[in-house]
Image (cartoon, helix red, strand yellow):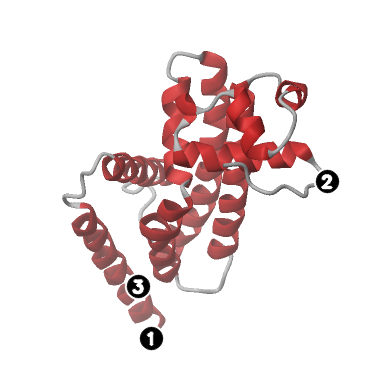
Amino acid sequence: MAQPAERVDPREGLLDAAERLLVEVGYAGISARRLAREAGVNLGLVHYHFGSMENVFLEALERFTGRLVERHRALYASDLPFIEKWRTAMAYLLGADLSSGYEKVWLELQAMAWNKPDLKKRLARVSAQWRAVLTKAFGEAMQEYGLDPDLFPVDAVVSLVMTFNLGVMLERHTGVLAGHRELLGWIDRWLEGLEQGKRGKRR
C-alpha cells in the first residue's frame, strides 16, 4: 500500500520507497509500476530520475550506506576506549542494522550484481567506504595496543573483520546462527586482554 507522500522532492520519495520495498520483497519483486505506486508518484518519474530500476536500487543502497558510515565515523572518532567502540559496532550488527533492513538490502544487491560488471564496480565503491572507516579506526587502535604490524597487518585485519561480518549477515539471513556469538565473545575476550595490557603499561 502506498505511503502518504507530502514530499517536495519525488526523487527522494522514490528512494524511500525503494528502500522499503527492498527490505520487504527484494529487488526481484519490485517493478517500476510498483515502486511508483509505493512512492505515490507518476510512473514516468522513475525513469526520468534514474533511467533504470538498477540505478534506483543502487542509489538507495548508496544513500543508506552513507547514513551508516557517518554513524560509524562518529563512533570511532569518539573518546571511548576501542573495545567499547567495537562492542557498540557489533551491537549495531546484531541489532539496529538487522532491524533496519540494511543487511538484506546489501546482500540483495550483491546478488543482483554478480553477472553485471558495471554494478559490481558501484558495489565495490560502497564496500570501499566501509573499508576506509575501519582501516583508520583499526590502524589507530593497533598502534595504541602496540601490536606488531608485521604480525597484524591492518589491511589483513580489516579484510578479516569485513568478511566475517558479511558471513554473519549471510548466514543469519539463511537461518544459520551457530557459532556467531561464540566468535564475537572470543574476539571480545582478546580485546579485553589487549585493553588490560594497555592499562598496565600506563600504570
Residue occupied by mark 1: 203
Which comes before the other along the chain, label 1 or label 2?
2
**Residue drawn where x is 64% and y is 33% of the image:** 37
Tell me where residue 150 sits by quadrant: top left
Residue occupied by mark 2: 8
**Mark 1 surroundings within 10 Å by alpha-carbon count, few (fewer than 14), some (14 through 19), many (20 or more):** few
Type of amino acid at the residue the image marks with label 3: Glu
Q: Nearer the viewer, residue 5 or 72?
A: 5
Q: Where residue 135 sits in the image (x, y, percent)? A: 50, 48
Type of amino acid at the residue the image marks with label 1: Arg
Which comes before the other along the chain, label 3 or label 2?
2
**Mark 2 surroundings within 10 Å by alpha-carbon count, few (fewer than 14), some (14 through 19), many (20 or more):** few
**Mark 3 surroundings within 10 Å by alpha-carbon count, few (fewer than 14), some (14 through 19), many (20 or more):** some
Distance, label 1 to label 2, CA atoms, is 58 Å
State if disc 1 and disc 3 touch (CB < 8 Å). no
Q: Nearer the viewer, residue 117 or 73?
A: 117
Quarter the N terminus occupies: top right
Question: In the displayed structure, does residue 202 sit left or right of residue 118?
Answer: left
Q: Is residue 141 above or below residue 8?
A: below
Q: Which of 169 and 15 is in front in this view?
A: 15
Distance, label 3 to label 1, CA atoms, is 13 Å
State if disc 2 and disc 1 touch (CB < 8 Å). no
Q: Where residue 104 sits in the image (x, y, percent)? A: 42, 40
Residue occupied by mark 3: 195
Q: Which residue lies furthest to the front in this view?
A: 1
